[in-house]
Image: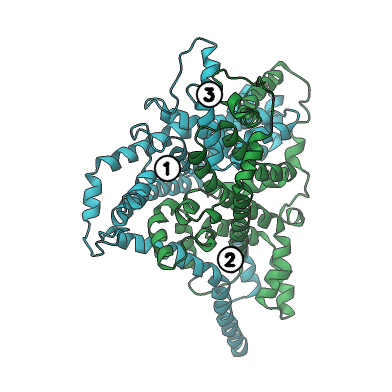
Chain colours: A green, B cyan
Amino acid sequence: MAISTLTRSTPATGSSQVIRQPRKKWTVGKIAAVTVAAFIAVLWLIPFAWATVTAFKSEADASASKVSWFPPSGFTFDAFINVFQAGNIPLWTWNSLYTSAAITAITLVISALIAYALSRIEFKGKKVLMVVIIAAIIVPPPVLMIPLFYQMLALKMIDTSWAIILPQVIHPAMVFVLKKFFDQIPHELEEAAVMDGASRLRIFMQIVLPLSRPILAAVAIFVFIGAWNNFLWPFISTNDDSLLTLPVGLQTIKSAYGVQYAQNMASALLAALPLIVVFLFFQRQIIKGVATTGLAGT
Amino acid sequence: MSSSTASRQISQPRTTLSPGVKAGLSLRRRRDNLNGWAFAAPFLVFFLVFLIWPILYGFYMSLTGKSLTGANDSLIGFSNYAEAFADAGMWRSLGNTLYFTVISTVPLVLVALVMAALLNIGLPAQWLWRLSYFAPFLLASTVVSLFFVWMYNPQLGLINDFLSKFGIPKVGWLNDPNVAMWSIVIATLWWTVGFNFLLYLAAMQNIPVQHYEAASLDGAGAWRQFFSITLPQLTPTTVMIVLLQILASLKVFDQIYQMTAGGPGGSTRPVVQYIFETGFTGYRLGYSAAISYIFFGLIVLVSVLQFVITRRRSA
């Protein structure tokens, strides 16, 4: 919050919000726009709605050849109860939560530190370092899966949480998102502290970080969503059933339950729930976070 | 960058310094060197171990006959690459990846633009639209796949049931080799378009109001304003979104692996799945590393193209 008033020359007028005020009347064009927007929204909600209806059906109704939004034998919690009794979803959710939290925390710490150095400190080799890290942005994770798997095997980390966490903490693009933000913080704030003989680390922790909360939150959101939903690497690096993350666990459910459609949908919904709930509460922050970090690339 | 160098020059004029100050400066420079690398060190450790090393080691692997069964570790030169270039399976999967990239990028950009343009008109209940368009992006690929496999079910699925009301015969959404890739594109569109939509929306809201006010005064209608102000102003955003989308689509794996496992008959198998299977089901790590590098070459090519295009724009 504070930084927006610092970096913007005009005090936050919320220009974007005020723009469309003059055209508030309901024209034909606007009604048409609402209609199209609503049509798309309905299309976009159908998969959720259909999954929800299916999850609350009995298995018999779910696999009935006549498709119905209102099942003949009524709605039931059976599928959810069965999924919970199978017992894996809470464990997988926990696995996803702590691995994603660890990935996010480590990413934030190491990226903010190096971003500060790149933004503020003149040191030998900095230019080369920047080029190398920029170049690393283009390395697609699937290219690394084979050597990384072999490496993890050698490090005896396969089938540990470390195998999931450690390779996912490198986000070169996020380093530059942070660096760009640090660049905009006025130097005067730090120079006073330098005069007082404060160390770099103290300046970083006590002046720069508190001013950077919005961007840190944005990066955290972006990294967390990515880690929470990542499939390929956790899928490769873990076999142990007790270590599976939610997305990988669901894949095993799919093959195990086969034609139990109500249970499949109940599992999918339970897996989707945590992030959707978080989104409902932090909609504004998440949207802003994704928009600011998004263009920097994934 | 520019601001940091500017203020540095003000605080440290380079001319006429007494020897004492010079010594102080070199001390400071040494301390800066130390500090700089100390701040960079934690990131660099991870960077070297989990990114640089696997890149180098992967290339080395691609020159060996290494396999998960531990058979042949010796260097065999570029024969893996020679084999890959003659491998119809690799070409087919690479072709599938490119096909997916082309037919997914177009709707993923256009639909996102339409969504953002609609909202930008100033519809009421903004949060509702944002929520419904963006929510799928928060789902894991497996959730998306479960949803769509169920809706695509030929006998019991929602979509075929709906179509049958209009007398349209059952479609094998994921079983028909001519349709399967399109079905995956539809699921992907539903899943990830919200991301591009948000980027567009943010860019649209940054267009200065004055442009529209001036156009209004000149009597330009909403359509006119969209095509002569909004779209041109969005060009840099569009270029970025298209390029990011191409790079993202080239990496496609999750939803295809989960929905069709590359079938029917390999008609949807992307190159990442081919690498995955060659390495982990076929145990041929060296060979799959070689294919990884061919794929990597393709990504680098696109990225360089991106760099050149964006460079030319900003220059």
Query: Which residue position holds label 3?
Result: B157
- Report whether A102 appears left or right of A284: left
Q: Position of residue B252 (x, y in %)?
A: 44, 42
| Amino acid type, callout 3 | Gly
Give the residue at mark 1. Answer: B250
Of discs 3 and 1, which sits in the foreground?
3
Q: Nearer the viewer, residue A270 or A105?
A: A270
Q: Earlier in the sequence, mark 3 or mark 1?
A: 3
Disc 2 and disc 3 on one polypeptide chain = no
User: x%, y% of residue B141?
Assistant: 53, 41
Rendering coords of residue A65 (x, y %) = 54, 19
Let me know if marks 3 and 1 both belong to one chain: yes
Q: Quadrant of residue A47?
A: top right
The outermost residue toward the bottom is: B20
Q: The disc labelled 1 sits on which kind of residue?
A: Leu
- Local crowd at mark 2 within 10 Å, few (<14), some, or many (≥20)? many
Quarter location, residue B21: bottom right
Q: Is residue A283 left or right of residue A252?
A: right
Q: Is residue B52 visible?
A: yes
Give the structural element (helix, strand or loop) at label 3. Answer: loop
Of residues A41 and B278, the one nearer the viewer is B278
Considering the image in quadrants, where does the N terminus of chain B appear?
Answer: bottom right
How far, Cα to Cα, is label 2 from label 3? Answer: 47 Å
| Chain letter for the residue marked with disc 3 in the picture | B
Q: Which residue is mark 2?
A: A110
- Mark 2 and mark 1 in contact (Cβ < 8 Å)? no
At 67% from the left edge and 22% from the top edge, which residue is drawn?
A73
Q: Residue at x 48, y 58 (%)?
A: A134
Residue shown at 33% from the left, 37% from the top: B95
